[in-house]
Amino acid sequence: MKIGRRAFVTAASTVAAFSSPVAFGQKNYDEGVTDTEIKLGNTNPYSGPASSYGAIGKTIDAYWKAVNAAGGINGRKVAFLSMDDGYSPPKTVEVVRQLVEQDKIFALFQSLGTPCNTAIHKYMNQKKVPQLYVATGASKWGDPQHFPWTMGFQPDYHTEAVIYAKHVLANVKDAKVGILSQNDDFGRDYFDGFKQGLGKETDRIIKHVTYEVTDPTVDSQIIQLKDSGANVFFNITAPKQAAQAIRKAADIGWKPAHYLVNVSVSVAAVMKPAGFDNSQGIITASYLKDATDHQWDNDEEMKTWSAWMDKNMPGANKADANHVYGYAASTLMHETLKRCGDNLTRANLMKQAASFRNFRVPLLLPGITVTTSPTDFYPIQAVQLSRFKNDSWDLFGEIMHAESS
């Protein structure tokens, strides 16, 4: 099944910028690379309202330490400099300037958050420093014509929201939709996609309320949505607010058809704190295997990951989907750096990132691979719907592929 999505076209000059040839065996480095080291920067909210995402940064850090212990990449160790920005865009700007201008990183990898990455988007492209595989699904990261140094990783929010809207129209009789969204680009991208998915039936949205990431709770917003008469709840929230919303809806006896965005589906960080009884039947769109899903108990990729976790992150909660995500994203970056060989220029890094063809990243769902090109900066373009059942996510339906450019 194909779902429409916005496509961007790259100018010929952009393609040429990533195509400078280097003779075989010749070493060619940009800032942040030596014969023995590759310096990668990262920002993550280890503190603040989105601190549950800090598990991603910790997983990535453990990944590079394991790579270094095994000899590095083509003989070079990865220096991973991860900074706490507290999910605050001004702080992101401050620490990224330090990483680029003082620490002299080769590239920024997996910087987290739509508002945080938005704050540094133009800066990174003006500096021509790769902002690679960002940890946010905003559709803006796939615009190589205007931002040739930025690329996303996960399926984009806009397309994900289109899928939810189409599922609502097909499955909920007389749908009346209430929406809770974060008041920033993260929330707006999902909201716009959902409206597009509804097509001519946008009047089915009867109530839309927002929250600020610094708000202590979203209780009042959930009460407003219930009082509106909505029988569908599109929950566009970060993990902390997602758990609050699920729990409050149960407390006040509101039982709508509930759609939860993929970035907040961690069993450990969201569903368990919300209460498993309160979470039954919630629907999301998945693209990664979930460690709590017993169908993967004998899956070779999951067994490899589980053993890796035992060795490199002992004591970490494997039910936290952020560990799966961080590991998967790191394997793609690992392969991208490996393909650069000794031509470790920023332009070649972006060229390699834009040259994948049906590449299998461990822990993606079966049938989902990574494909990119100079005109397609959306690495993962497929999802499968899941429903929360008992204490884990249960996949259903077919793999849905977004239309690439």
Image (cartoon, rainbow, N blue to C red):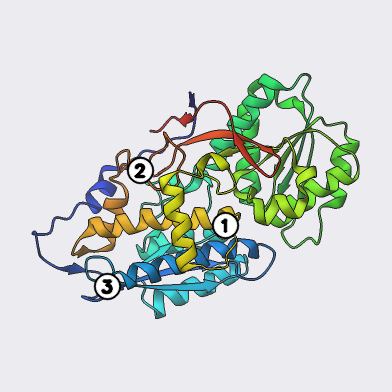
Under mark 2, the amino acid is: Arg
C-alpha distance separating marks 3 and 1: 33 Å
Task: From this view, report whether residue 179 is shown above or below residue 18.
Answer: above
Q: Earlier in the sequence, mark 3 or mark 1?
A: 3
According to the picture, the residue beneath numbered tag 2 turns out to be 360
Q: Residue at coordinates 34% horizontally, 62% vertically from top-left? A: 128
What element does badge 3 sit on? loop
Q: Earlier in the sequence, mark 3 or mark 2?
A: 3
Task: From this view, report whether residue 280 is shown above or below residue 265.
Answer: above
What element does badge 2 sit on? loop
Residue 187, percent across and down? Answer: 66, 47
Residue 261, percent across and down? Answer: 64, 43
Under mark 1, the amino acid is: Lys
Q: Is residue 74 left or right of residue 247?
A: left
According to the picture, the residue beneath numbered tag 1 turns out to be 318
Q: Residue at coordinates 62% horizontally, 65% vertically from top-left? A: 87
Q: Is residue 244 left or right of residue 319?
A: right
Which quadrant of the structure image shows residue 125? bottom left
Under mark 3, the amino acid is: Val
Label placed on residue 336: none
Residue sitting farthest toward the bottom: 102
C-alpha distance separating marks 1 and 2: 22 Å
Q: Taking the image as drawn, is residue 214 in sight?
A: yes
Q: Earlier in the sequence, mark 1 or mark 2?
A: 1
Label placed on residue 33: 3
Q: Nearer the viewer, mark 1 or mark 2?
A: 1
What element does badge 1 sit on? loop
